[in-house]
């Protein structure tokens, strides 16, 4: 009987040590996804400055994929990831991704929040603007909320400076 109690006690101690590790592993998916999104936004901006051509990031209609593009008369999704040379895109909420896009709010001066699903970085300066026909509108705010379970991370883009912050 003492042996059984000893085994149960050892299992209880092992479980109490392992459980915090498992829950922190779940939040790592969220941290990685938020940092990947922040890096993608920074990369689009740096490419706009480096090449002198406007570059942008687009969230597709189903809110599951971010793609980087060169902003021309028709957005060309030809921006490549510098590490593996594949088309630069991030997928959320599908396949292997355990992180979903819970919310997006992109607001430009004089434009509706819900209509916008992209940010363009002006060529040469990297200032975040809208891709609207006519004169581009200045970014007022941009925030993407990523969610995994009950945990959330926010990725924000500051107007003018385009500083990207993960909260």
Image (cartoon, rainbow, N blue to C red):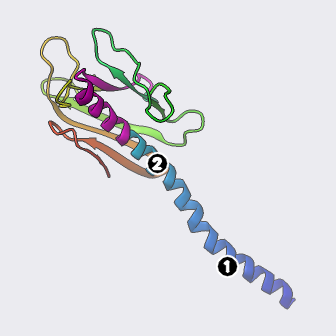
Identify the element where label 1 is drawn.
helix
The numbered dot on residue 32 is: 2
Q: Is residue 95 left or right of residue 72?
A: right
User: Magenta region: which residues?
Assistant: 38-62
Q: Measuring 62% from the left and 73% from the top, which residue is drawn there?
A: 17
Say which of 91 and 147 sits in front. Answer: 91
Q: Is residue 116 visible?
A: no
Categorize mark 1 by other alpha carbons within 10 Å: few (<14), some (14-19), many (20+): few
Whole-Å distance between the Cαs marked 2 and 1? 30 Å
Identify the element where label 2 is drawn.
helix
Residue 91 image point, x, y percent: 49, 32
Q: Is residue 69 visible?
A: yes
Residue 163 image point, x, y percent: 23, 43
Residue 121 image point, x, y percent: 23, 27
In magenta stretch: residue 44: yes
Q: Nearer the viewer, mark 2 or mark 1?
A: 2
Categorize mark 2 by other alpha carbons within 10 Å: few (<14), some (14-19), many (20+): few
Residue 8 image point, x, y percent: 77, 80
Say which of 115 and 24 sits in front. Answer: 24
Q: Is residue 21 left or right of residue 53?
A: right
In magenta stretch: residue 50: yes
Q: Measuring 23% from the left and 19% from the top, which residue is drawn there?
A: 131
């Amino acid at each position: 009987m003492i042996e059984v109690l000893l085994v149960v006690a050892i299992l209880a101690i092992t479980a109490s040590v392992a459980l915090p590790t498992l829950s922190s592993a779940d939040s790592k998916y969220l941290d990685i996804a938020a940092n990947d999104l922040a890096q993608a936004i920074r990369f689009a901006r740096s490419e706009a400055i480096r090449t002198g051509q406007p570059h942008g990031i687009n969230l597709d209609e189903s809110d599951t994929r971010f793609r980087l593009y060169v902003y021309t008369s028709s957005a060309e999704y030809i921006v490549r990831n510098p590490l593996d040379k594949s088309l630069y895109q991030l997928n959320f909420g599908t396949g292997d991704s355990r992180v979903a896009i819970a919310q997006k709010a992109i607001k430009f001066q004089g434009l509706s929040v819900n209509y916008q699903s992209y940010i363009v970085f002006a060529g040469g300066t990297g200032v975040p603007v809208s891709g609207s026909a006519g004169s581009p509108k200045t970014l007022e705010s941009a925030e993407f909320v990523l969610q995994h379970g009950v945990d959330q991370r926010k990725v924000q883009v500051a107007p003018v400076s385009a500083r990207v912050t993960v909260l």
